[in-house]
Image (cartoon, rainbow, N blue to C red):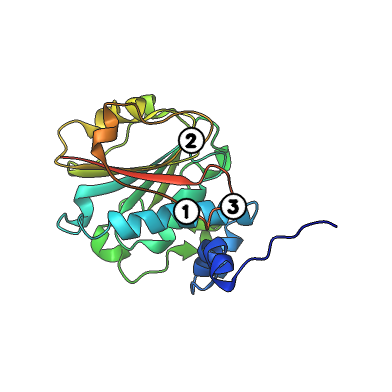
Amino acid sequence: MAHTTQLSTQDLSKYFSNINEVSRLDTFADLVVTGVFPNIKEFCEASGMFKAYHNYVHRPTQKYPPYAKSIYVVGDGQSPRCGVMFAFRTKDINIYSIDPEMKDKYLNWTTDDGVPVSEWLGTPVFDYEIKCRVRRLRCYKQKIEDFGAEFGTQVLCPIIVGCHCHVNLEKMLKCHLLNGVAETYAILMPCCISLINNDQKKHIIAEYHDQGIPSAHNKVYILRWE
């Protein structure tokens, strides 16, 4: 007789936590229409990375004004999945989605070039009129080592996000945009390569398995430098 595993309601709640959370958002339909999420697994991963940001990074970085912090999603894939998730669920932070395999159609995929931060607040993040572009999100077809962007003001608090990316943290931290910053955070979920070396482990402020991510590689690390 075949054995079956019976899951409690509590177990099921953990496994479906990320997709349940994102599906309850008022903007969930818009997230789907962007077309950047090919399946539920990608929704769960991006939602899980945002959850880590919300639980461990959002509050301590509120001391910085919006223009002084940015989120860099490294190795976001051919489509800006985490970039879109963070753009939809934050109000006033620039998001940069960076990957050498990024599809060309997402480059310059933003509606807000030259628009001051004060005008972003209270405006829809999603623009149906301009080919489904996403406010505050910029996509780059580059390696993080080669990445560069123009800022009107120095970013004091960069936040690095790496979801199953194939570049280690040492290369991410060598990005010239991180020079002269006051504080840096990294939210990482490794897959087939080790992202964090022994010296960097002392900067880990939290680590846990996110059971809401349907992958064997669902351990999340949050690191901080000051």
Distance from the alpha carbon under mark 2 to that under mark 3? 17 Å
The answer to whether residue 143 is seen in the rendering is yes
The residue identified by callout 3 is 214
Q: Position of residue 209 (x, y in %)?
A: 45, 50
Quarter of the image for the C terminus: give it: top left
**Mark toward the viewer: 1 or 2:** 1
Q: How crowded is mark 2: few (under 14 residues within 10 Å), some or many (20 or more)?
A: many
The residue identified by callout 1 is 210
Give the SS element for disc 2.
Answer: loop
| Depth order, front residue of 47/215 | 215
Residue at left 47%, top 63%?
Answer: 126
Q: How crowded is mark 1: few (under 14 residues within 10 Å), some or many (20 or more)?
A: many
Seen in the picture, residue 76 relative to 145 is either above or below; the reply is: below
**Mark toward the viewer: 2 or 3:** 3
The residue identified by callout 2 is 165
Seen in the picture, residue 175 relative to 131 is either above or below; the reply is: above
Residue at left 49%, top 72%?
Answer: 25
